[in-house]
Image (tube, grey):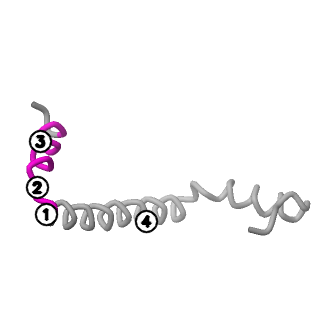
Amino acid sequence: MNRIQNIEHEIKKLSNAELRAFRAWFLKHDSEIWDEQIENDVLSGKLDKLAQDSILAHKKGRSKQI
């Protein structure tokens, strides 16, 4: 078994309460990783072109209010 299969196997053995706790922890953990990646991308300039293109499109009237 590889690591993922081991983790899946262990998760299947959790009680409902343990699964709820794990799910809450994992959602928080996943969100923190995503936030860190976005922050790193912003700081490194990876999103600059996307932001510039979006601003230009808005100025040209090619955006919609949501």
Please provide the residue range marked out in magenta.
4-16
Residues under numbered marks 1 and 3 in contact, where contact means CB atoms less than 8 Å apart: no
Residues under numbered marks 3 and 2 in contact, where contact means CB atoms less than 8 Å apart: no
Residue occupying image coordinates x 14% and y 47%: 12
Residues under numbered marks 1 and 4 in contact, where contact means CB atoms less than 8 Å apart: no
Q: Amino acid at mark 3?
A: His
Quadrant assignment for the C terminus: bottom right
Residues under numbered marks 2 and 1 in contact, where contact means CB atoms less than 8 Å apart: yes
Instruction: State the residue position of label 3.
Output: 9
Residue 41 left/right relative to 12: right
Q: How much space separates mark 2 and mark 1, taking CA atoms?
A: 6 Å
Instruction: State the residue position of label 2.
Output: 14
Viewer-nearest of labels 3 and 2?
2
Q: How much space separates mark 1 and mark 4, taking CA atoms?
A: 26 Å
Viewer-nearest of labels 1 and 4?
1
Between 32 and 65, the one lying in front of the other is 65
Between 34 and 42, the one lying in front of the other is 34
Instruction: State the residue position of label 4.
Output: 35
